[in-house]
Image (cartoon, grey):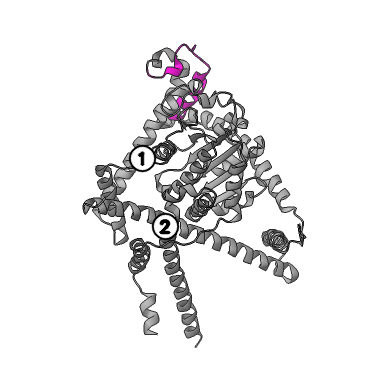
Amino acid sequence: MNLSPAELWIGGILTLMIFSFLYRDNPFYKFAEHLFVGVSAAYWMVQGVWGTLMPNLVAKVAPGMVQSFMPEAAGKNPEWHYLIAALFGVLLLTRLVPSIGWLSRWSLAFVVGYSAGTNFIRYLQSDFIAQIRSTMIPLVVQGQGGLDLGASFSHLVLIVGVFCGLVYFFFSKEHHGALGRVSRIGVWTLMVTFGASFGYTVMARISLLLGRLQALIIWLRLVSGGS
Amino acid sequence: MRLLAFFKTLDRRFIFLFVGLAVIFPFLLDLDLPEYPTVMVKAIYNTVEGLQPGSLVLMPFDYDPSTAPELDPMAAAVVRHCLSRDLRVCFMALWPEGQGMVSNLISGTVQPEFPDKVYGRDYVNLGYKAGGQGLINAVLLNMRSMFTTDAAGVPVDSLPIMIGVTNLKDFKFIMNFSAGRPGSKEWIQFAGDPGRIPVASGSTAVQAPLLYPYYPSQMVGLMGGLKGAAEYEAALLAGYPRFKDSRRVATELMVPQAMAHFVIMLFIVLGNIIYFAERRAGKR
């Protein structure tokens, strides 16, 4: 990304303001934080109007009104059924008036119904059935030169890990004896998973810090007159 | 015991200072760590290699500037690879800020490094569309109803790259860059699985462990965080030596990243030593 000197200055100063929170809370940090929230809200609102409301509603219902700045609307006939969606959208805003706020439940019911219906099918197929299928793998993997030890071990870890993890979440019987030992392996599997997640999270946060430091170095070079 | 008490009451700002020094110091030195692509990253590389020139690749940029340091380098590497293979790339975004990330990539990487590639013919920025998984569900069947123009408002019917594109199944590969929801999970669930379209993910490191279960049956490959990006850069350099002079941001950042990890590991070990020493002292 090629930034102008002014953009580099703004970015550099705001980064230092945010970093100042590492020492303690202060007015500079608060200013940068509020600025970020304000700019984000404005950006989302502009995107909502020009990216969603105008092309998906106004251009459909009243194409003649917007054809001067939205060429794709030119020559199109109004599609009145989009007013139904607009009505549902307006109903959501009735929450602002407590006496008729119950009307917003109609829109929410539509949103929840649609989301639940589509998500139910996709989760069932992609996250349930497909995942079970992915776990049904051979314990002994044959490679080109005979037994593939690495792949076989990998499959074994996967199957044992899934099985023991499921046993850990089986609460109909007390975890004693053999069940307890299998459950214990399940706990270890979960701990390894959490450890991996934590490691990845650390990596992510450090990467973001590096990104800001890189930007700061570019800014400092500009300040010091370097290229 | 005095030493233990000192470390136990150590101000957390000293930890910030140590981590800060650990990442700043390598910036001053010009060091590189060797990178080797792992199986999941190599799988993405091989998928791109296996596509016929002219094939359409969809690249949804589902992230914002807050995760750009992780995802920008991998997006640049994959785009370089696709355009070098003469694949046609359609950019889009399910996140409002994603559209800006695409614009940055086009102006910072595509235009300067591939001046022969023409907008609208070899690549296009379809911009942001609201709807999340609902949008994916819709474009799986009919892309034209949702995308009537590109990000600049140019009707898609006038763009040569969009000729013959009716729905997602016209794309040979979906390479998603994701920082959360909607993102890679939704592309697998609502496009890859029902449409049988190969989907790969370049995701933030935080999100990567959640995506592992989809590999390899539902997702052709996964690049997790900056490390994944550095691995892809290494694979690209090995296959296309002409990129040796291109900036490899992820590879550059691997040394400070490793130093920071080293310092954090030291603090974890130190914390455990203090914990066990205290427990032992308590038993006495």
Residue B202, visible in the rendered structure: yes
Type of amino acid at the residue the image marks with label 2: Leu
The location of residue B72, given as percent across then percent down, is: 44, 46
Q: Residue furthest bottom?
A: B284
At x 38%, y 33%, the residue is A45
Residue B246 left/right relative to A11: right
The location of residue A198, given as percent across then percent down, is: 51, 61
Q: Which residue is mark 2?
A: B253
Residue nearest the observer in this picture, A105 or B248: B248
Number of other residues with Cα within 10 Å of mark 1, as a class: few under 14, some 14 to 19, many 20 or more: few
Q: Which residues fall within the magenta stretch?
A: A69-94
Number of other residues with Cα within 10 Å of mark 2, as a class: few under 14, some 14 to 19, many 20 or more: many
Residue B146, visible in the rendered structure: no
Q: Nearer the viewer, mark 2 or mark 1?
A: 2
The location of residue B235, given as percent across then percent down, is: 54, 52
Q: Which mark is residue A160?
A: none
B127 inside magenta stretch = no
Residue nearest the observer in this picture, A191 or A71: A71
Residue A123 left/right relative to B161: right
Judged by its main secondary structure, the magenta piece is helix
Q: Which residue is mark 1?
A: A40
Residue A149 left/right relative to B115: right
At x 46%, y 43%, the residue is B63
- Mark 2 falls on what kind of element? helix
Q: Identify the subunit bearing mark 2.
A: B
Residue nearest the observer in this picture, A53 or A92: A53
- Mark 1 falls on what kind of element? helix
Quadrant of residue A53 within the rendered picture: top left
